Structure formats: C-alpha cells, structure tokens
Image (cartoon, rainbow, N blue to C red):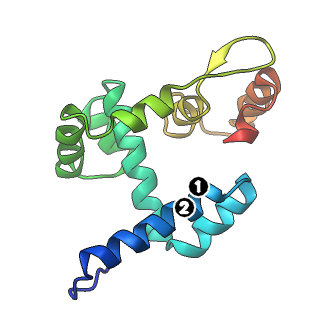
Amino acid sequence: MVYISKKPLKPETLSRISDLFIAHIAGIKTKQNSKRFIDEILTNTEKKMLAKRLAIIVMLHRKQSYSIIIGILKVSRTTIAKINIDLKNGEFDFIISQLNKTSKNASGNKSSNFSIWLDIMLGMRMPAVGKGRWKFLDEIKQKKNGVYSKI
C-alpha cells in the first residue's frame, strides 16, 4: 500500500514541488533515461498501480466489460467503477487523446503503440500455452518495423 504522510504541506510548497517534478519529467529526452527515472522514483507497487490505472482507462474507453478487466488486470469492481465515473466525467480526455495519437509505421499503416501493446500483453489476443506461443510477437515486430521497440 502506498503511504502518504498525514502531515500536510503548505499549498504553495506542494505546488512548487509539483511544478519542479513535472518540469523534470518533461525534460527527459530518452526512453532509457525515462525508465531509469521512473525506476528510481517509484516503487514497484506504485508502477504497477499506475500501469493498471492506465490500462483500466484504455479498456473502459474501448468498452471492455468489467469482468474482462477484472480477469485480466486482477483489480476490484470498485476500482474500475471509480475510474469509469471519472472517465465519463471527462477526467481522462487528455490521456485518451494522447493514446489515440497514431504513428505511421514503415508500411504506411497507422497504429497506436500503446494500443497494440495492450491488445497483445493484456490478453485480448493471448496466445495458446506451449512452446513458441510468443513467436507471433517477433513476426509482428518485424512487420511493424520496430513499433514495439518504441514502447
């Protein structure tokens, strides 16, 4: 569980710290540095929580059922419902717009990197069990000419 101190910061102090944090994130130029920053600043639990929240937002936006989301992400119905209310109230419009941005790959097709990754890794297209079950990822990677390496 994430721990937050019960001792509140002054609003101006919190605002200044938040501004510096955002400015630092915005200044990170490479995927490698972004990963290192995230790994150093967030615990594994925090990373999982944020990743699951993002996946819930996307899956709800794509009209996935609660039961599918629960089965794939192992989250509670209450968690999904809270995020769904915020989604309906427009809380995640910017996130959705960013995820809907497309990138043109070498074959000229447009596809969202996150969208492709989510389809494959969260089970909407889970391969059968057994040797070579992930071989199709290599084939997709070759066809998409590096789309996955940019995620």
Q: 62 above or below 135?
A: above
Residue 12 x %, y %:
30, 74
The quadrant holding residue 38 is: bottom right
Q: Which mark is residue 85?
A: none
The residue lying at 17 percent from left, 43 percent from top is: 81
| Mark 2 → mark 1, Cα distance in angstroms | 5 Å
Residue with the most extreme bottom position: 7
Left or right of 105? Residue 41 is left
Q: Is residue 70 visible?
A: yes
| Residue 8 placement (x, y as % from top left) | 22, 83
Image side of residue 46 versus residue 116, left or right: left
Q: Is 84 above or below relative to 143? A: below
- Along the line of sight, the residue nearer the viewer: 127 or 108: 108
Q: Residue 26 got which mark?
A: 1
Q: Which numbered circle lies on residue 23?
A: 2
At x 42%, y 56%, the residue is 50
Choose between 86 and 132: the one closer to the eye: 86
Residues 125 and 37: in front is 37
Q: Amino acid at mark 2?
A: Ala
Query: 10 Å neighbourhood of mark 2: few (<14), some, or many (≥20)?
Result: few
Q: Secondary structure at mark 2?
A: helix
Q: Where residue 47 sits in the image (x, y, percent)?
A: 48, 63
Three-letter code for the amino acid on which mark 1 is drawn: Ala
- Where's residue 120, x and y in %? 57, 33
Q: Badge 1 local density, few (<14 within 10 Å), some, or many (20+)?
A: few
> CB atoms at circles 2 and 1 under 8 Å apart?
yes
Query: Dividing the picture into quarters, in which one does residue 140 lie?
Result: top right
